[in-house]
């Protein structure tokens, strides 16, 4: 019945696992993860978006460049100089100023209402009419930067060892390092992103103000990439109540 139907909602690659496990396999998906079960939406049982928040990408090595979707809005730190015509020439959208350097917020921070501006022509960043929207988008973006993102896995390359191991494994990729003391070459602590510094302070203060859990019980709250609160209560023995 749904064959040929267009679903105009965000579906992230991470959603396939819980969606297929619940839908096709008929198994209960009870794990807390970034993926959401969208089977009912795909099959037409329910209407409306399942996912309200999606982190598209985030890179601390490029001073926090990245993008996030929250509801109808998209927040991104990315210069408009990266927009291109099909012939490869770069251009600016609308009246945007692309003349600034990396520290020029007017050139590198952007907010678009994708419902009314799907071509991303009108940058709402810094528009006082959208100050509440901007604050929410920045807060969620900085949550991922400060609390979720970890050090990348870049290490010294060993291409010769990788190819040698692959050839010895009938040309199937396999591990090739038995022991390594290599550390992360570019730790996150070596980089700074001023936009999220204030949110880091706020988050730390909020954590300090959180009352302790009842004796014998540890309470932890997490938020997944869909903006859902994941509350997990664990007893002192590590078992779920």
Image (cartoon, rainbow, N blue to C red):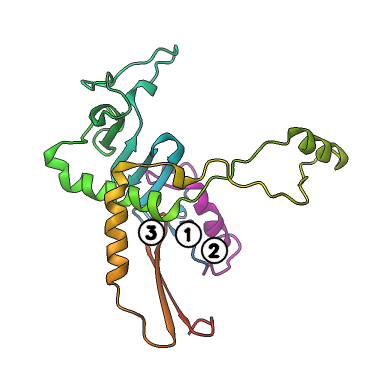
Instruction: Identify the residue at image location x=69%, y=50%.
Output: 181
Asked which secondary structure carries label 1, the reply is loop
Nearer to the camera, 115 or 25: 115
Apparent side of residue 69 relative to residue 236 in the rendered image (left or right) = left
How far apart are the alpha carbons under marks 1 and 2? 7 Å
Label 1 neighbour load within 10 Å: few <14, some 14-19, many 20+: many
Q: Which residue is mark 3?
A: 46
For marks 1 and 2, the one nearer the N-term is 2
Q: For marks 3 and 2, give the one nearer the viewer.
A: 2
Label number found at residue 8? none
Sooner in the amino-acid sequence: mark 3 or mark 1: 1
Identify the element where label 2 is drawn. Answer: helix
**Which residues are drawn in magenta?**
3-30
> Tag 2 or tag 3, which sits nearer the N-term?
2
Residue 25 lies in the magenta stretch = yes
Q: Quadrant of residue 103?
A: top left
Residue 37's disc is 1
Residue 170 visible in the current orientation: yes
Circles 1, 2 touching at the beta carbon (< 8 Å): yes
Residue 221 x, y percent position in the rendering: 39, 69
Residue placed under numbered mark 2 in the picture:
22
Q: Residue 196 in magenta?
A: no
Tell me, yes or no, if residue 59 can be seen here.
Answer: no
Left or right relative to 217: residue 73? left
Instruction: Tell me where residue 164 appears, x and y as whole percent.
Output: 83, 36
């Amino acid at each position: 019945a749904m064959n040929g139907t267009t679903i105009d909602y965000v579906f992230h690659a991470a959603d396939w696992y819980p969606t297929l496990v619940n839908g096709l396999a008929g198994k209960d998906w009870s794990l807390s993860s970034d993926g959401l079960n969208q089977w009912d939406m795909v099959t037409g049982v329910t209407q409306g978006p399942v996912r309200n928040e999606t982190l598209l990408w985030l890179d601390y090595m490029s001073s926090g460049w990245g993008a996030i979707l929250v509801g109808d809005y998209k927040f991104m730190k990315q210069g408009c100089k990266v927009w291109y015509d099909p012939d490869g020439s770069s251009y600016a959208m609308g009246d945007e100023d692309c003349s600034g350097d990396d520290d020029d917020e007017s050139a590198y921070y952007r907010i678009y209402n994708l419902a009314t501006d799907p071509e991303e022509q009108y940058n709402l960043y810094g528009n006082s009419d959208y100050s509440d929207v901007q604050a929410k988008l920045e807060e969620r973006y900085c949550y991922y930067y400060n609390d979720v993102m970890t050090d990348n896995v870049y290490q010294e390359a060993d291409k010769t060892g990788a190819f040698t191991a692959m050839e010895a494994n009938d040309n199937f990729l396999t591990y090739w390092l038995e022991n390594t003391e290599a550390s992360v070459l570019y730790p996150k602590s070596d980089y700074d992103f001023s936009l999220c510094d204030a949110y880091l302070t706020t988050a730390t203060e909020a954590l300090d103000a959180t009352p302790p859990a009842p004796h014998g019980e540890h309470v932890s709250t997490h938020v997944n990439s869909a903006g859902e609160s994941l509350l997990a209560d664990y007893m002192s023995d590590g078992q779920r109540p």
